[in-house]
Amino acid sequence: MPGVTHIWVFAVGLLLQITYLMLRYTVRFRYVREELKGRGSDEQDINDITRGQVGYLVLLTTITAGLTAGIYLAIPYFTRLAINTLAGLPAPHMLVGFLVVVLIAAATVMYLRSSSED
């Protein structure tokens, strides 16, 4: 029995990510659908809205899968480029770590601000 390869791990992770997005947005779509029914909206209008939401979901999951796969495949090239670029610095691991922490903090702030506006 062969061991687990990195491609297998990546594929399972990507599948989990896509499944999470599908489930999360399906629950949201159901909530919107029930709310529209409760307000007395026409069934055809509700179906049109749901169709648009599902189209959005398919687009979102396709873009997510494509970007994730692209990043995964590009990492070896970025690693080689980064090693050559960072080789002259006195503590490259500290610089990269600092940049990653700053990016994570900025992304978290942006996410929290966008979710507070909803």
Image (tube, rainbow, N blue to C red):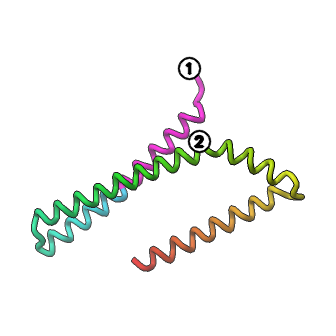
Q: Residue furthest top?
A: 1
The residue lying at 48 percent from left, 45 percent from top is 14
- Badge nearest the viewer, 1 or 2: 2
Picture quadrant where residue 109 is located: bottom right
Query: Is-magenta flag for residue 30?
Result: no
Marks 1 and 2, how far apart at CA: 26 Å
Query: N-terminal of the two: label 1 or label 2?
Result: 1
| Amino acid identity at mark 2 | Leu
- In the depicted structure, whether residue 11 falls above or below residue 109: above
Instruction: Check disc 2 and report the residue beneath it.
Output: 73
| Amino acid identity at mark 1 | Met
Tell me the number on the disc at residue 90. Answer: none
Q: Secondary structure at mark 1?
A: loop
Q: What percent of the width, then of the height, locates residue 71?
A: 58, 48
Instruction: Check disc 1 and report the residue beneath it.
Output: 1
Numbered range of the magenta stretch: 1-23
Quadrant containing the N terminus is: top right
Left or right: where does residue 67 sit relative to residue 38? right
Q: What percent of the width, then of the height, locates residue 60?
A: 39, 55
The residue lying at 52 percent from left, 44 percent from top is 69
Left or right: where does residue 104 sit relative to residue 85? left
The residue lying at 10 percent from left, 68 percent from top is 42
Question: Callout 1: 10 Å neighbours few (<14), some, many (20+)?
Answer: few
Picture quadrant where residue 3 is located: top right
